[in-house]
Amino acid sequence: MSDPTGPVASPEFERRDRRGLALARAVYLGIPVVFFGLLCWISAAAAPELGFNWQVLLVPLAMLAINLRLLRKNRYRPSRWAFAGLACGGITGIVVAFYTIVLDFDWLPRLFIVAGLVGALIGRAIGAAGNRVISYPADPELADSSYELVYRLRTPPNILLEITKERVHVKELVLRGSGTDQSTVGVGPDYRIDWVTGTHEVSLSGAERLKFPLNLRTRPMSSPGPALILQFKGVDWVLPINHAGGLAALIARRAETRRRVVQQETLAAHEAEASTAEGSTAEAETPTTESPTSESPASEDQAQDRDS
């Protein structure tokens, strides 16, 4: 969704936004609903002596409750939709296949691992489709939205460029043990998006030695194709990445918008400080005047003595 205070989004972008949201809802809400329906059907088709197993329905209901919260949290983080689909689809496939044991199927419960893999692939495909709808093409109109966008470098593909409303991150996928851990390497707190001083698209031949100031385990390597140059107050990043032209315009537009916001916040803070200082000065300069009150008893006695 575009920023309501910014430019009006085009019909094409509104269509992309609605389609991406529909795919996100299919992952976070649709999969648990299908999960619930399949378990209801299996419980109803079970042998009469087993009865309807209501307890097993708590699993999809718990998934649905958790996903409602995650959907609100990750609404504008499309890069997380694929993992959510993988997890939900995998759990659904494993539990449904294993629960068919109540139908006296001997072969299907034994394939619960295969069913889990199939469910995970289907869920991941839905989430990845939603991410592609939102993130591609990378046009400047995305700058006016609240989406946190993640793009993969061409070489090496384990380095990611993340663009938020306030920052530009470079992340590296590091394989540790049997799992994959994504961590931010070498990006200090000074690399805010309003510090971007220039964005350029260049074309690489593949023989260049790239200039990259961050200390990563795997450094970006030159490869034939487009590349993005980011300039941060004299520091240049050269990132071999597709859609470099659109990303350059997107980052430049977000940087300019963020600079205006920072200037407005700074001006508002200065005005608040000035008004507070003027109020304190006015209170200090206000003289304390005594109200005209009746004379004290001692003064009245002295006046009576003089009269007598």
Image: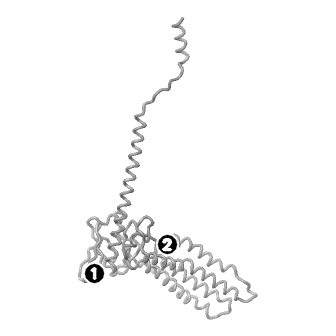
> Where does label 2 land, which residue?
75
In the picture as drawn, the residue positioned furthest to the bottom comes out as 107
Quarter of the rendering containing residue 226: bottom left
Q: Which amino acid type corresponds to the residue marked 2 in the rendered image?
A: Arg
Residue shown at 35%/62% (left/top)? 259
Total count of labels: 2
The amino acid type found where label 1 is placed reads Ser
Q: Nearer the viewer, mark 2 or mark 1?
A: 2
Asked if the residues shown at circle 2 and circle 1 are in contact, with their CB atoms under 8 angstroms apart, the answer is no
C-alpha gap between disc 2 and disc 1: 34 Å
Q: Residue at x 36, y 61 (%)?
A: 260
Q: In the image shown, does 273 or 111 lie closer to the viewer?
A: 273
| Residue 222: assigned label | 1
Residue 29 place in picture, x, y as percent: 57, 77
User: Is disc 1 placed on a helix, strand or loop?
Assistant: loop
Q: Determine the residue positioned at 55% across, 12% down.
A: 301
Q: Nearer the viewer, residue 241 or 269?
A: 269
Q: Is any atom of residue 219 visible in this view? A: no
Q: Indicate the quadrant containing the C terminus: top left, top right, bottom left or bottom right.
A: top right
Residue 285 visible in the snapshot = yes
